[in-house]
Amino acid sequence: MKYMITGAAGFIGSHVCTELLANGHDVVAIDAFNDYYSPALKRDNAGSLDDNGHITWVEEDLLFCDLDRLFDGADAVIHLAGQPGVRLSWDRHFDVYVERNITASQRVLEAARRTNMPRVVLASSSSVYGNAPSYPTTETSPTRPFSPYGVTKLAMEQLAWSYADNWNVPVVALRYFTVYGPRQRPDMGMHKFISKVARGEPVQLFGDGQQIRDFTYVSDVVAATIRAATLEVPTPSVLNVAGGSSTTVNEVLRLVGEYVGRDVIVHRVPEQPGDVRVTGGVIDRARRMLDWSPAVPLAEGIKRQLLHQLHGSE
C-alpha cells in the first residue's frame, strides 16, 4: 500500500515512516524542514530512512504545494505536520499557528476531497480539552482549549467534521497525549529534563511540579496512528491516544535523575499561560475501534529515550 505522510521528518512522522517501511509499504514523505527547531535534526531523521527504496521525499510547504498530484494513488494520508507548542502560540506567533494548523489542514482536506482519498488521519491533541471539569477525559468531554495552540487543533477537527459531513471525506482525528521517546523535539519537557540532568545543569521547572501528564510512548502512538489509517474504522471518528501513565512532573524528574545517576537541580519559575494542570485520557474507544492499547510503561519509555538521547541507541 502507498501512504502519504505530512510532517514526515519530525518526531512522530519519522517513526511512522520507519514502521510503514518496515512492513513493506510505499511512503511519500512531505516535510518543509522549517526552523521551529533545528532543521538539521529533521534531516538526520530523514537521512536514517533514505536507504529504503520505498520512500520518496518531497521538500515542500503544504500551504503552496500541489497536493492533488502528491495524493494521487495514495491509500491514505496521515497528516502529522503542524506548528507545535503551547507557550509560543500567543501574541505575534499566532499567525503561524493559524497557517500551519488550520490553513494547511484545510488544504489537505480539500485535496483529499478532490482526489477521493480513502482515509485521512489527523494528528490532534489533548490540548483541545483545556482544563477539563473532570478526569480522565473521554472524547465526549467538553472541549475548551486553554491556549491558542489548542484552539487551532480544535479548529482543525471542526474543519474535518465539515468535510466529512458535506463531502464524505473519511477522517479520523487522534488526540495525542504528551508523546515522548527517541527523536523527541528538543523543546519538549522530557528531552530537556534528560539533557539538563545528564550535564548536571539546573532544570527549569514551571510551577510546583505537581502538574499531571498522561505520557504516551512514541511507538504506541505510531501503532495507533497506523491502525487508524489501515483498519475499517467508522468515519468520521475522534479517538484519544493516551499512554495510561498519568504522572506528576516531579515524579518524572525523579525517575530521570535515578536513571542518569545524578541529583536533579531544580530552578523553579512561575507557571506559564496555557499550561493545564492535568491531562489524562480514556482510551476505551481506541481499544474497541483499533484493537489498540499502550504497551510501553513510563519507566521503560524514559529508559529508552535516555539511551537514545545520551548514547544514540534506540
Image (cartoon, rainbow, N blue to C red):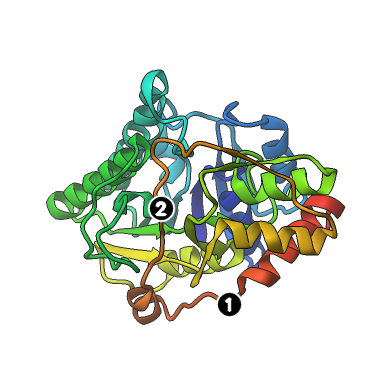
Report the front residue among 40 and 171: 40
At which x and y percent is residue 240?
37, 65
* Residue highlighted by disc 2: 277
- Residue underneath mark 1: 295
Q: Is residue 27 left or right of residue 152?
A: right
Up-down: is 266 above or below 37?
below
- The residue sitting at 39% across, 49% down in the picture is 276
Q: In this view, does 60 lie to the left or right of 157?
A: right
Horizontal and vertical percent for residue 311? 86, 54
Residue nearest the observer in this picture, 41 or 256: 256
Kindly indicate the quadrant of the structure image that contains residue 204.
Answer: top right
Residue closest to the far left: 166
**Amino acid residing under circle 2:** Arg
Mark 1 or 2: the one toward you: 2
- Report how far apart the C-alphas of labels 1 and 2 lie in the structure: 25 Å
Tag 1's secondary structure? loop
* Residue 122 appears in the figure: no
Instruction: Measuring from the top left, give residue 103's x and y in whole percent.
Output: 32, 31
What residue is rendered at 62% in x and 40% in y? 57
Considering only vertical position in the picture, is 26 above or below 88? below
- The residue at 47%/59% (across/down) is 212
Question: Which quadrant of the figure has residue 192?
Answer: top right
- Location of the C terminus (image quadrant): bottom right
Q: Which amino acid does label 1 sit on?
A: Ala
Q: Position of residue 217 (x, y in %)?
A: 59, 64
Can you name the residue that lies furthest to the top here? 92
At numbered mark 2, what does the secondary structure look like: helix, strand or loop?
A: loop
Q: Which of disc 2 and disc 1 is earlier in sequence?
A: 2
The residue nearer to you, when weighing 258 against 138, is 258
For the point 49% across and 65% down, the residue is 226
Asked if residue 282 shows in the view, the reply is yes
User: Could you tell whether 313 is left or right of 163 in the image?
Assistant: right
